């Protein structure tokens, strides 16, 4: 896997190892997602479908 992953909520690049060490990951549909912070992770867990919509534009 590449050294960088993208936070699906805000679009920031995240280092998966750092995110994993900090507990900033979530699984959805058999894939693991990485987040820049707890806020993004919680938003994702709240409604993951929203972030896969073609209309969704990641923003901070
Ligand atoms: Zn984020």
Image (cartoon, rainbow, N blue to C red):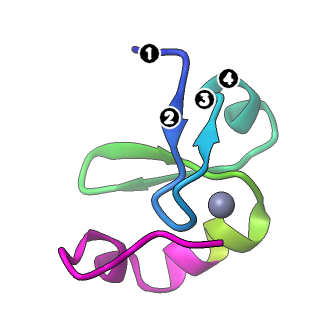
The answer to whether the residues at label 1 and label 2 have Cβ atoms under 8 Å apart is yes
**Crowdedness near tag 3: few (<14), some (14–19) or many (≥20) residues, C-alpha within 10 Å:** many
- On whether ligand 1 comes within 8 Å of the CB at mark 3, the answer is no
Q: Could you tell me which quadrant the N terminus lies in?
A: top left
**Crowdedness near tag 1: few (<14), some (14–19) or many (≥20) residues, C-alpha within 10 Å:** few
- Reading the image, the residue beneath label 4 is 17
Q: Position of residue 9 (x, y in %)?
A: 52, 67
Q: Is residue 58 magenta?
A: yes
Say the numbered circle drawn on residue 16.
3
Q: Is residue 51 magenta?
A: yes
Among the 4 quarters of the image, the one containing residue 23: top right
Mark before the other along the chain sequence, 1 or 3? 1
Among the 4 quarters of the image, the one containing residue 17: top right
**Crowdedness near tag 2: few (<14), some (14–19) or many (≥20) residues, C-alpha within 10 Å:** many
The answer for how far apart the CA atoms under marks 3 and 2 are is 6 Å
The answer for how far apart the CA atoms under marks 4 and 3 are is 4 Å
Say the numbered circle drawn on residue 2.
1
Mark before the other along the chain sequence, 4 or 1? 1
Pair 3/2: label in front: 2
Secondary element at image label 1: loop
Pair 1/3: label in front: 1
44 lies above or below 36: below
The answer to whether the residues at label 4 and label 3 have Cβ atoms under 8 Å apart is yes
39 lies above or below 22: below
Pair 4/2: label in front: 2
Say the numbered circle drawn on residue 5.
2
The answer for how far apart the CA atoms under marks 1 and 3 are is 9 Å
Say the numbered circle drawn on residue 11.
none
Pair 4/1: label in front: 1
Which residues are the magenta region?
A: 43-60
């Amino acid at each position: 896997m590449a050294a960088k992953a993208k936070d699906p909520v805000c679009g920031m690049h995240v280092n998966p190892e750092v995110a994993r060490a900090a507990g900033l990951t979530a699984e959805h549909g058999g894939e693991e997602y990485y987040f820049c912070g707890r806020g993004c992770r919680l938003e994702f867990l709240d409604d993951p479908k929203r972030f896969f919509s073609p209309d969704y534009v990641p923003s901070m």
